[in-house]
Image (cartoon, grey):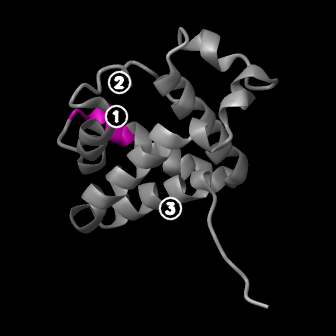
């Protein structure tokens, strides 16, 4: 019997974030595009109904019904659920550095192009939550 191995969408995003950090010049364009693809399509792969069910039914109210931000929050919760505390802290630190640095972070630039068409300002005011 042939086994088909695959990675979940949240696990893929975690791997892409870490890979981009480890080798930014070699990976940032493809990894950012892949992360953007997951975020743009996450609700369409059977996740949308979860926004209406506990424990995730608080998300839409918290983001003024902005589906882009709701998707990112749901994906983030799903990523958090599969990471060890050490991995969660490591990935969170990478993302906080990307968002707060205001330097030309390659992952941030790629996500700007992929998701925000250059306007990433909506993400900057948010603080890290564990």
Q: Which residue is mark 2?
A: 124
Q: Residue at x 24, y 40 (%)?
A: 113
Q: Using the rendered view, name the quadrant where residue 27 is placed.
A: bottom left
Counting residues from the start of the chain, the first of labels 3 and 1 encountered is 3
Q: Which residue sits at x=23%, y=31%?
A: 117
| Circle on res. 99 | 1
Q: State the predominant SS element of the stretch in magenta.
A: helix
* Distance between mark 3 and mark 1 Cα atoms: 18 Å
* Magenta-span inclusion, residue 101: yes
Indicate the position of residue 12 as horizontal and vertical percent values.
Answer: 54, 59
Query: Residues under labels 3 and 2: Cα distance?
Result: 22 Å
Instruction: Say the numbered circle drawn on residue 15.
Output: 3
For marks 1 and 2 on the same chain, the one whose residue lies earlier in the sequence: 1
* Observer-nearest of 73 and 80: 73
* Image position of 72 with respect to 24: above or below: above
In contact (CB < 8 Å): disc 1 and disc 2: yes
Neighbourhood count class around disc 3 (C-alpha, 10 Å): few under 14, some 14–19, many 20 upward: some
Disc 1 is placed on an element classified as helix
Segment tinted magenta in the rendering: 97-102
Quadrant of image for the N terminus = bottom right
Q: Residue at x 58, y 53 (%)?
A: 9
């Amino acid at each position: 019997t042939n086994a088909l191995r695959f990675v979940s969408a949240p696990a893929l995003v975690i791997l892409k974030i870490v890979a981009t950090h480890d080798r930014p010049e070699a990976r940032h364009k493809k990894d950012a595009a892949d992360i953007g693809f997951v975020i743009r399509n996450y609700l369409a792969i059977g996740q949308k109904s979860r926004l209406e069910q506990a424990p995730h039914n608080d998300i839409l109210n918290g983001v003024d019904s902005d589906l882009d931000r709701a998707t990112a929050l749901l994906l983030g919760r799903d990523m958090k659920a599969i990471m060890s505390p050490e991995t969660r802290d490591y990935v969170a630190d990478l993302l906080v550095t990307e968002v707060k640095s205001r330097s030309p972070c390659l992952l941030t630039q790629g996500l700007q192009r992929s998701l925000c068409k250059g306007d990433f300002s909506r993400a900057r005011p948010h603080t890290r939550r564990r």
